[in-house]
């Protein structure tokens, strides 16, 4: 049997480490770059662009893209079939694996894009499936996907050397998460949630590491809470000037 029929050499050169996520970028036979992720019983290979398995469902970049075209063609009035739900499940898993890989490689902007894809697909499934149990099987992971998205976006801003904006991104994300928990009647559990605690810890570590005090938006919230409206107006002006940038 040819050596090409098994992966022994790869596994021997790249042992599995159960305590970490092992990923790498390699070139395929056509020199395209692909991601490889070492798992306990083998490895996964994922495309870096488009759908992770390289397929183009009905000519679209992803199955979600195909579903969006169906939604437009049918004016939004349709329900997902069992087969379409199965394909959605496949796509959820594929984008999860690639998002984990991007995070491990600190490719934060790419992790944001894959998180957005998953959140968009979740929204679509919620709109177009009457099987609430199936919808909830995905919705239960929404806070986790949002956590990855918030974390990744903040870290991408940090790589651009704007720690204050990274802190603000975490604050906005925490506000969005709190809105989700409130919508689900879980607002009393929000402050004790592990994902929330990790985001707060990240925010405060960035504040300490980069010596960032209260951001302008935090100062604005403080001023409004203290009914210092003149101060709030001045801070709003500063925020607007910062948004416009230097002239």
Image (tube, grey):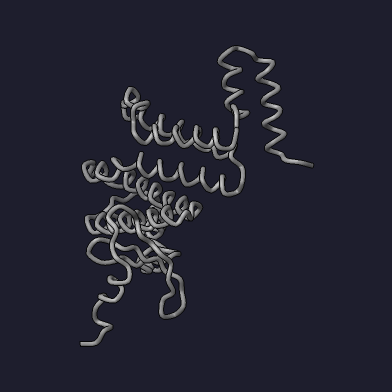
Does residue 12 appear left or right of residue 156 in this picture?
Answer: left
Q: Quadrant of residue 239?
A: top right
Q: Residue at x 42, y 49 (%)?
A: 115
Residue 58 visible in rendering: no
Marker count (numbered): 0
User: Of residues 127 and 200, which is closer to you in this image?
Assistant: 200
Q: Residue at x 34, y 44 (%)?
A: 127
Image location of residue 240, percent across then percent down: 69, 32
Q: Is residue 211 above or below residue 121?
A: above
Q: Quadrant of the C terminus?
A: top right
Image location of residue 189, percent across then percent down: 32, 26
Q: Quadrant of residue 91?
A: bottom left
Outermost residue toward the bottom in this view: 1
Q: Is residue 182 above or below residue 132?
A: above
Image location of residue 60, percent across then percent down: 41, 65
Q: Residue at x 71, y 22 (%)?
A: 234
Q: Residue at x 24, y 61 (%)?
A: 40
Does residue 36 appear left or right of residue 224 in this picture?
Answer: left
Residue 104 visible in rendering: yes
Does residue 31 appear left or right of residue 236 in this picture?
Answer: left
User: Of residues 81 and 187, which is closer to you in this image?
Assistant: 187
Image location of residue 10, percent across then percent down: 31, 73
């Amino acid at each position: 049997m040819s050596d090409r029929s098994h992966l022994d050499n790869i596994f021997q050169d790249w042992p599995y480490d159960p305590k970490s996520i092992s990923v790498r970028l390699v070139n395929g036979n056509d020199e395209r770059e692909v991601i490889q992720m070492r798992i306990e019983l083998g490895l996964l290979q994922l495309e870096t662009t488009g759908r992770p398995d390289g397929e183009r469902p009905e000519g679209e970049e992803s199955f979600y893209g195909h579903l969006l075209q169906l939604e437009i063609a049918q004016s939004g009035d349709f329900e997902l079939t069992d087969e379409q739900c199965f394909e959605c499940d496949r796509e959820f898993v594929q984008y999860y694996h690639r998002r984990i890989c991007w995070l491990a490689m600190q490719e934060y902007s790419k992790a944001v894009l894959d998180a957005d894809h998953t959140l968009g697909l979740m929204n679509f499934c919620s709109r177009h499936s009457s099987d609430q149990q199936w919808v909830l099987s995905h919705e239960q992971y929404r806070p986790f996907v949002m956590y990855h998205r918030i974390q990744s976006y903040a870290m991408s801003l940090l790589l651009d050397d704007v720690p204050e904006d990274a802190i603000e991104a975490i604050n906005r994300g925490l506000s969005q998460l709190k809105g989700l928990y409130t919508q689900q009647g879980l607002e009393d559990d929000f402050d004790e949630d592990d994902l929330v605690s990790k985001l707060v810890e990240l925010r405060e570590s960035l504040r300490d590491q980069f010596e960032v005090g209260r951001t302008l938006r935090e100062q604005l919230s403080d001023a409004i809470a203290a009914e210092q409206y003149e101060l709030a107006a001045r801070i709003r002006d500063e925020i607007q000037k910062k948004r416009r940038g230097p002239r």
